[in-house]
Structure formats: C-alpha cells, structure tokens
Amino acid sequence: MMEFAYDRNAAVQYARQWAHGRNPDYYDFEDLGGDCTNFASQCVLSGAHVMNHTPDFGWYYYDLNNRAPAWTSVLSLYQFITQNKGPGPFGAEASLEEAREGDLVQLKLDEPVFQHTPVIVSIQKSGASHANPLDGILVAAHSIDSSDRPLSTYDIHGLRFIHIEGGRK
C-alpha cells in the first residue's frame, strides 16, 4: 500500500467553499442529528482523495443509505482515522501545538461525549491579540454553519485535535 501526503490546502479550500452551503453530491444530515461530521468527512476527502470501502468499519459515502458509520458519526470518525491501517486518511490524536490547517477538532459541548467536528481552516500565532490560545484557531463547520470562527467562541467542555498524517491507497 502506498502512503501519500494529505493536501491540507484542498481540505481548507473545500471547507471555506461549503461552510455556508451544501454540496448537492451529499445528503444534508442536519435533521438527522447534525451535518458536522458529514461536512468534516467531505473536507478530509478533498485532502486525502481516497475512501476506505471496508463494510461497516471503513470510511466511505455513496448516498444516504450506503455509507460507513465513520462518515457521519463523531466517535466512529475519530476511531477510523486514529486506527486506520488500510486505504484512506490516517492520523492521530494531537495536542494544540501539533494541530495544523486541514486537521479536525472534536468538541464536547452540552453532553458528556464528543458531539461536534469542526475543521481547522487557519491557525494564527498567539500573542497579545490572542489571550486565549483557542482564539487563534479558526474553524469551519456545519450544524451552526460557520467559517473562520474562533474555536474559543464555542462553550467547550472538552476537546481533542485529530491530526491527519496522510493517506494510503
């Protein structure tokens, strides 16, 4: 299996293009629990270019009724990316300092589990203008559509960064 670099610019461009809209090639899951992880998966696909078609445990989307749980589930996406040894994107949980544009951040908001998956679109150097280090992490997301939103504006009860290390095909 061949490993290749993750195209962070493509993931960020996709995130900015579709943050306030819906790509008609994908179902909008807003009324089925939220569209954030579906949107995050689309962004990652733009940077990784390869799906993993393994039934049940892969990461793929064909339509509403033919997709892997990891495509739309916060927990399943985390497990897939951090444990993937096959085709598609792979990565690891990371610290704030290791996070890069095109990576994901998962948030605990009003529940004790991770429930939201924004995409990092910009990381600005901390300094006097960023008293909180999360002020300089700008994200794009669906389910409260946003682009270039400071991560610090969420009411966060927990967070984890997922660094996409590359892809395989």
Image: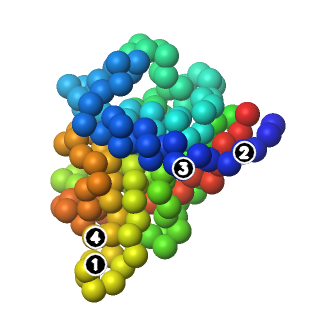
| Circle 4 Cα neighbour tier, 10 Å, few/some/many (<14 / 14–19 / ≥20) | some
Three-letter residue code for mark 2: Phe
Q: Marks 3 and 1: CB-CB under 8 Å? A: no
Q: Which of 97 and 75 is in front in this view?
A: 97
Using the numbered discs, state the Cα–Cα distance from disc 2 to disc 3 in whole angstroms.
12 Å
Q: Which of marks 4 and 3 is nearer the N terminus?
A: 3
Task: Please provide percent x and percent y for residue 134.
Answer: 31, 70
CA distance separating discs 3 and 1: 24 Å
Depth order, front residue of 96/130:
130
Residue found at x 63% / y 25%: 54
Q: Mark 2 points at which residue?
A: 4
Q: State the SS at label 1.
A: loop
Residue 10 percent across, percent down from the top left: 52, 42
Disc 4 designates what residue?
135
Specify the amino acid type for callout 1. His
Contact (Cβ within 8 Å) of mark 4 with mark 1: yes
**Residue matched to label 1:** 130
Q: Of the two numbered discs 3 and 1 on the same chain, state the one appearing first in sequence.
A: 3
Q: What residue type is labelled 4?
A: Asp
Residue 29 or residue 166, whichever sits in front? 166
Q: Earlier in the sequence, mark 1 or mark 2?
A: 2
Q: What residue type is labelled 3?
A: Arg
Which mark, by number, is residue 8? Answer: 3
Residue 42 showing in the rendered view: yes
Measure the C-alpha gap from mark 4 to mark 1. Answer: 6 Å
Mark 2, other Cα within 10 Å: few <14 / some 14–19 / many ≥20? some
Alpha-carbon distance for marks 2 and 4? Answer: 31 Å
In space, the residues marked 1 and 2 are separated at their CA atoms by: 34 Å
Q: Is residue 108 visible?
A: no
**Residue 89 percent across, percent down from the top left:** 61, 42
Spatial CA span between label 4 and label 3: 21 Å
